[in-house]
Each structure stands twice: as structure tokens, then as C-alpha cells.
Image: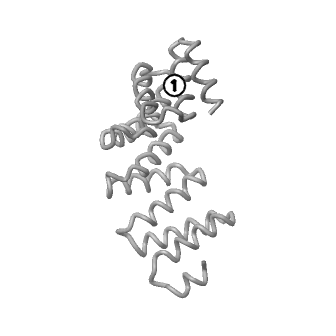
Amino acid sequence: TEAWAAAHPADYRGPLLVARSLSDAGDTTGAEASARRSVEMAPDSLAPRFVLGGLLQASRRFAAAESVWVEVTRRMPSATRAGMELAYCRQSLGDVEGAVSALRDVIAREPDNASALNFLGYLFADRNRDLLEAEGLVRRALARDPDNGAYLDSMGWVYYRLGRLEEARRELERAVEL
């Protein structure tokens, strides 16, 4: 990848390829620097920012990754993946309200996005709050993908938090089977 990047010095994809290779080799510092070079070379392109955000997040540098995802969602509000990653970073940083906000933004644009519905429902259940809303959110996710083990696990967790233990057991057992 370094040879290709050197042969194409004006192409922002070169540093992206190098960043991925360095990341795969365990050089997170070099990977981040290369991804940042790509962002500088193509400041209006989202691809380098997605790679940079992913690298930072994989390195558990959630605050730095959050700033990348904020910029991506500012530039392209319809970038669902960036909204989901922003929510994940904020949750990882302990900013639950920020995560909720990011997920609500995704759901406002894509009301049937099962991943976002489940994520928000699970987030509520995990925090033992807004449980009736959590049940509705996860139910909507399951309507889109009824055999998704992760969604069934979320529903089991919601039922557990609601004290509906038999229903919780049934959903969790089915999740394990799947």
C-alpha cells in the first residue's frame, strides 16, 4: 500500500490504504496520522473521515472519534452509520443523553431503522428508564427482523426490567437459540 500511495501522491486513497494496513499491523498511531493526511488531502470527502472515525473508535479514543462523527453528521445529516457511531461513542463516554439524541436523529430520518430502534430500546432498558418506550422501540425493530437474536435479547432485557420474568426468559432463550 505504501508503494501504491507513493506512486499516486495526489490521490487521497493512498493514505487511506496505508492507514488500514498500518491499523491491521497494530500501528494505531501511524494509521491515525495517515488517515488524517487523507482528510487533509480531500477535506470535502467523507470517506477519509469515516476511516479516521473508525480507527479512533477501534482504539477506544471515543472523544476524538466523537468529534469526527459530529463533523460527518454536520456535513451529511443523512449519514446513518455516522449517527449510529456517534451514539456509540457518546454512550461509551457516559453521555447517555447525547447518545439518545443521536439515535433519535437517526430514527427521525429513518423511522424503520431496526438497528437504531433496537439500540435506543436497549440503551433505555440497560439504564432501567423509559421502559414502556423501550418495549415499543424494540417491538418495532423485531417487526422488521423477527429472528434477530440481538433484538430478542433486547426485548428479554426490557421484559426483565419490567418484571415480566416469564416473557423475559422466553425471549432470552429464543435469542440464545438463534
Q: Can I make out residue 96 in this image?
A: no
Amino acid at the residue labelled 1? Met
Residue 54: x percent and y percent? 53, 56
Q: Residues within 10 Å of mark 1 (few under 14, many from 20)?
A: many
Report the residue at 50% width, 39% height from top.
91
Vertical position of residue 171 compared to residue 11: above or below:
above
Image quadrant in which you'd find residue 1: bottom right
Q: Can I make out residue 57 in this image?
A: yes
The colour scheme is one colour
Q: Report how many numbered discs are placed on residues in the image.
A: 1
Q: Please tell me which residue lies in front, 15 or 109.
A: 109
- Write down the residue under mark 1: 155
Report the residue at 47% width, 36% height from top.
145
Specify whether 153 is left or right of 120.
Answer: right
Q: Please tell me which residue lies in front, 114 or 32.
A: 114
Q: Quadrant of the C terminus?
A: top right
Q: Residue furthest bottom?
A: 7
Residue 72: x percent and y percent? 38, 57
Report the residue at 37% width, 53% height from top.
79
Residue 50: x percent and y percent? 46, 60
Vertical position of residue 85 compared to residue 120: above or below:
below
* Element carrying mark 1: helix
Report the residue at 44% width, 20% height from top.
131
Residue 149: x percent and y percent? 57, 33
Vertical position of residue 168 compared to residue 23: above or below:
above
Q: Please tell me which residue lies in front, 85 or 115.
A: 115
